[in-house]
Image (cartoon, rainbow, N blue to C red):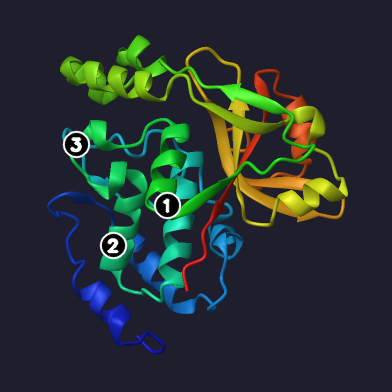
């Protein structure tokens, strides 16, 4: 156990069982989180943490493993949303110099649930536009909406996919009475308008480089009926342009896309552009 200090030991000792009320995880998850928080430099940003998950397998529905909603921590398998939440929670913990397992659980709960309150399946933020708004309210993130020539499009948000396809969701199929609550949540955000950068403008110009920073959250907008956001990842600038670090269903793992984001968007007809979300710095 050389090289593992006292607080890591505490993490390990308190996680001898995965049967914790309200939480689902494996011991390897707690070890991985505690190690990252211990080793992260003071200025570690989202990309520092995200790159530690490169190669992790893409697996969908990793949160849908319990009959009743619990806080699921899974660092072994990722989808695009859980990768973003995991990395943002780590980054915010590091900013606030919080290194304990319990600190991470609290931060992940704050990110995943409305106003940070885990109160069943319907308290989870299922639509990312709702997630952005809620996390702005608690001052954890800020969506970039500044007036400039790149933000030439407006997304008119209209969501109803979950309430129209309840059998596609394990929890809603098992608990049809929850569908009405989901419908009310959808109606609450339908009608919102948000500026975004259309995919034709996602190139390698100086203005885009000034707007988008390495490690910003990129939310890919879609024109698919009933949905607002198709995919999530983190911004990575290279010499040839903007790239996306993401949990990729195509590559079946977490990757930094080899193609530029502009080309990636053009290959997906239902993708319309990008919204940019930045973690607020807490010092």
**Residue 249 location (% of width, % of height):** 56, 33
Q: Residue at x 36, y 23 (%)?
A: 188
Q: Residue at x 36, y 73 (%)?
A: 98
Residue tagged by mark 3? 120
Q: Residues within 10 Å of mark 1 (few under 14, many from 20)?
A: some
Mark 3 or mark 2, which has the lower sequence index?
A: 2
The picture quadrant where one finds residue 190 is: top left
Residue tagged by mark 2? 27
Instruction: Kindly state the secondary structure of the residue where label 3 is placed.
Output: loop
Q: In 3D space, how far apart are the residues under numbered discs 3 and 1 (Cα atoms)?
A: 24 Å
Q: Residue at x 79, y 46 (%)?
A: 208
**Residue 103 location (% of width, % of height):** 30, 67
Q: In 3D space, how far apart are the residues under numbered discs 3 and 2 (Cα atoms)?
A: 24 Å
Mark 1 or mark 2, which has the lower sequence index?
A: 2
**Residue 264 location (% of width, % of height):** 74, 33
Whether residue 56 is visible, yes or no, is: yes
Of residues 47 and 151, which is closer to you in this image? 151
Residue tagged by mark 1? 76
Q: Quadrant of the N terminus?
A: bottom left
Query: Are the residues at dot 3 and dot 1 in contact (C-beta closer than 8 Å)?
Result: no
Instruction: Kindly state the secondary structure of the residue where label 1 is placed.
Output: loop
Q: Is residue 137 above or below residue 2?
A: above
Q: In 3D space, how far apart are the residues under numbered discs 1 and 2 (Cα atoms)?
A: 11 Å
Query: Are the residues at dot 3 and dot 2 in contact (C-beta closer than 8 Å)?
Result: no
User: Closer to the observer: label 3 or label 1?
Assistant: 3
Q: Residues within 10 Å of mark 3 (few under 14, many from 20)?
A: few
Of residues 123 and 267, which is closer to you in this image? 123
Instruction: Kindly state the secondary structure of the residue where label 2 is placed.
Output: helix
* Side of 223 relative to 28 (left or right): right
Q: Is residue 272 above or below residue 279?
A: above
């Amino acid at each position: 156990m050389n090289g593992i200090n006292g607080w890591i030991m505490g993490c390990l000792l308190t996680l001898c069982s995965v049967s914790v009320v309200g939480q689902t995880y494996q011991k390897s998850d707690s070890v991985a989180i505690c190690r990252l928080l211990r080793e992260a430099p003071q200025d570690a940003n989202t990309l520092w943490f995200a790159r530690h998950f490169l190669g992790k397998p893409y697996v969908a529905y990793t949160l849908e493993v319990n009959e009743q909603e619990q806080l699921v921590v899974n660092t072994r398998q990722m989808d695009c949303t859980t990768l973003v939440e995991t990395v943002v929670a780590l980054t915010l913990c590091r900013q606030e110099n919080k290194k304990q397992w319990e600190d991470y659980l609290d931060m992940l709960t704050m990110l995943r649930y409305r106003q940070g309150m885990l109160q069943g399946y319907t308290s989870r933020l299922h639509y990312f536009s709702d997630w952005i708004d809620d996390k702005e309210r608690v001052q954890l993130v800020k969506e970039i909406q500044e007036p400039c020539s790149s933000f030439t499009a407006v997304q008119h948000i209209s969501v109803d996919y979950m309430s129209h396809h309840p059998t596609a969701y394990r929890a809603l199929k098992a608990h049809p009475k929850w569908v009405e609550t989901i419908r009310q949540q959808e109606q609450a955000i339908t009608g919102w308008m948000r500026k975004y950068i259309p995919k034709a403008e996602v190139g390698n110009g100086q203005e885009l480089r000034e707007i988008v920073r390495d490690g910003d959250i990129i939310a890919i907008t879609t024109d698919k009926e009933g949905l607002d956001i198709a995919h999530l990842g983190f911004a990575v600038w290279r010499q040839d342009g903007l790239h996306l670090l993401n949990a990729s269903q195509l590559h079946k793992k977490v990757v930094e896309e080899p193609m530029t984001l502009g080309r990636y968007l053009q290959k997906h007809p239902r993708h319309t552009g990008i919204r940019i979300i930045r973690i607020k710095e807490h010092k």
